[in-house]
Amino acid sequence: MASSSTDRIRNVALVGHSGAGKTTLVEAMLFRSGVLGRAGRVEDGTTVCDVEPEEQSRQMSLSLAVAPVEWDGHRINVIDTPGDPDFTAEVRAALHAADLAVFVVSAVDGVQVGAEIAWRLCEELDVPRMFFVNKLDRERSSFDRTLDELRERFGQGVAPLELPIGAEAGFHGIADLLTDTAWIYDSGHGERTEIPEEMEALERTIHEQLVEGIVVGEDDLLERFLEGHVPTVEELDRALLHGLTAGSVYPVVCGSASVPIAVDRLCQFICEIGPSPADRGSVAVRAGDDVVEVAPDPTGDPLAFVFKTLTDPYVGQISLFRVLSGTIRADDHLVNPRTGVDERLHGLFRLRGSTSEPVDHVAAGDIAAVAKLSGTATGDTLAPRGTPVVVDPIEFPEPVHAVAIRARTQADDDKLATALHRMQDEDPVLTLVHDDETGQTLVRGTGATHLAVALERLQRKFGVSVDVEDLRVAYRETILTAATAEGRYKKQSGGHGQFGVATVVLEPLERGGGFEFADEIVGGAIPRQFIPAVERGIADAMAEGGVVKGYPVVDVRARCVDGKAHAVDSSEMSFRAAGRLALREAMAAAQPVLLEPISELVVTVPSELQGDVMGDLSARRGKVHGTDLLGPTEVAISATVPTSELLRYAVDLRSLTGARGRFAIRAAGYDLLPGNLVDSVPARG
């Protein structure tokens, strides 16, 4: 595969809801371009992009995949992305490498939540957008209904460039509104012809509306249009490119990926009106405290950004990167500014799904891969030595769902941490933590599907078997009133014995007060050198657990007010034991209670779902503290909720809102557990 100049490269991310046909569209593009002799099928597990067994068994994409397509002298680097909301991080990574997002929308199902999530990410990252209305050959498909939904959700910048010819099973071509011509696919290939007579009036009306909408964005073109000049197709293409790049126009084309119909027209539109890396302009990078602009110039200093890391059982780590500047050649040395590691790019290659093709150089704007970089991860920059510029890393979503796992055997336990670390290279959202409070090992991710896939890969790729356990909650115990107790430790077993007596007053502190110790001994009732041992004994007993369910004790003040010692038998150990006994006895008399952890939530949902979400939070014993409008369609709800009620909130919120809700969570201290729920709390293990 020959190298392409920067102005003939198109980096395109296919985004949209799961099942809209993105992966099938990639197959159709590869087939129409001549790369494939026959398009694969998602149902058969034979597509280029879905290569992992978990993708094939679920018949859905779970990670991004790159498939270059050569078309009309251009290279289209197609990046297929997952549509399931659990894998939004993959979409975000793809958009960091893309100059254009093509939203694949089913004409049967219309605009779904996956498209809305991708749209929000494109707005955040300022990525140009266009639409491909797919599945027009299916029953119940409707281009007009889908177009209305697109305009309703994404504004009046949505501009159709094509109309379908025929409907459902009779769909067999498209009318090109820019050229006033039709493309008919009865023979399996597009044949250019005249607009069908029955469509002429409609096509002409929409063509005029389209031209008026396009020229409005170009002052010179608009002025000449008002003077009677009819814009040429080339002029309209240039105006569309400008509007698309500026984010004011969102072109809509249509077809069917499975037949395929009009996929060749999509490829042509991407080449004609899709922005190249040169059209997108410079990239802002940080050089120390300064921000500088780096142009996509093939003759400039080499600079690359790693947007995805893969692990291959034979090759090892593979880093997918986009060249931001310069031309990178095989065996070049570049430095990772984050780690300071000098990386030698031994062999460059292009990936098409799981197959690779070696290349000797990669120019600015292009996408390629390199294997076995020793210290480079997803989101890292590769720059020349002495030029420590850094591209802002990818901001991945916080993991908000967790499962507790236990290695099945000791051999599995020995391999677990290393295997999870290698999986994190591919999926930075995954986190592995050991919860010292509960003693459990937790794997965190974005949702149930995300974690289920991760555990399957853990077994398949790394041979590590784990069992999933119920999540435990780290409760606490405290007291409501003061109490006094004497801790007496006496032991005689020949020779020196053990003797220590400590009288302790236990008092409650405010929530979050922790532990305070006060030495109020007078007259030497306890020798000075033994008083710290009393404090350590009390602290030991607090950590070992209280008298309600055995959870750690917090928010108490212990005043050591009296005691007794023996000139021979007293020791640090005996007074430490006395302090422990005093704590337990005093706590039993001081109205011990359970405290439960509380989490602070900020839940962002569509405004029409505000009532449902607030009602659900109340049912979880939550307290809503306020709401903030986020634009015309979303609201952020702030609340505090017992952590035990949120163990599956990522899954439940997705179900409640149709995956349109999202949330951020953080620990917010402890609060009193209602007495009627104490019996439902398991004793500390």
Image (cartoon, rainbow, N blue to C red):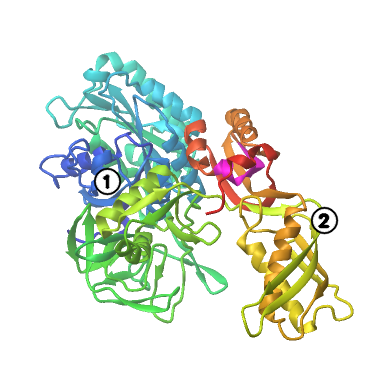
Q: Is residue 520 left or right of residue 511?
A: right
Q: Is residue 642 magenta?
A: yes
> In the image, is residue 459 above or below residue 493?
above
Q: Secondary structure at mark 2?
A: loop
Nearest the camera: 67 or 127?
Answer: 67
Query: Is residue 114 something that shows in the picture?
Result: yes
Nearest the camera: 98 or 464?
Answer: 464
Give x and y (percent) for residue 665.
Answer: 58, 49
> In the image, is residue 446 above or below residue 583?
above
Corner quadrant of residue 47 = top left
Nearest the camera: 153 or 611?
Answer: 611
Q: Nearer the viewer, mark 2 or mark 1?
A: 2
Q: CA distance from mark 2 to mark 1?
A: 58 Å
Q: Is residue 112 magenta?
A: no
Query: Is residue 50 something that shows in the picture?
Result: no
Q: Which residue is mark 1?
A: 54
The magenta-colored residue range is 635-646
The crowd level at tag 1 (other Cα within 10 Å; few <14, some 14-19, many 20+) is: some
The amino acid sitting under disc 2 is Ala
Q: Which residue is mark 2?
A: 482
Give x and y (percent) for residue 218.
Answer: 48, 41
Tally the numbered discs. Answer: 2
Q: Residue placed farthest to the right in the image?
A: 523
Q: Earlier in the sequence, mark 2 or mark 1?
A: 1
Q: Residue at x 65, y 54 (%)?
A: 476
Q: Residue placed farthest to the top in the image?
A: 198
**In the image, which disc is placed on residue 143?**
none
**Quarter of the image where the N terminus is located:** bottom left
> In the image, is residue 338 above or below residue 448?
below
Give x and y (percent) for residue 145.
Answer: 40, 21
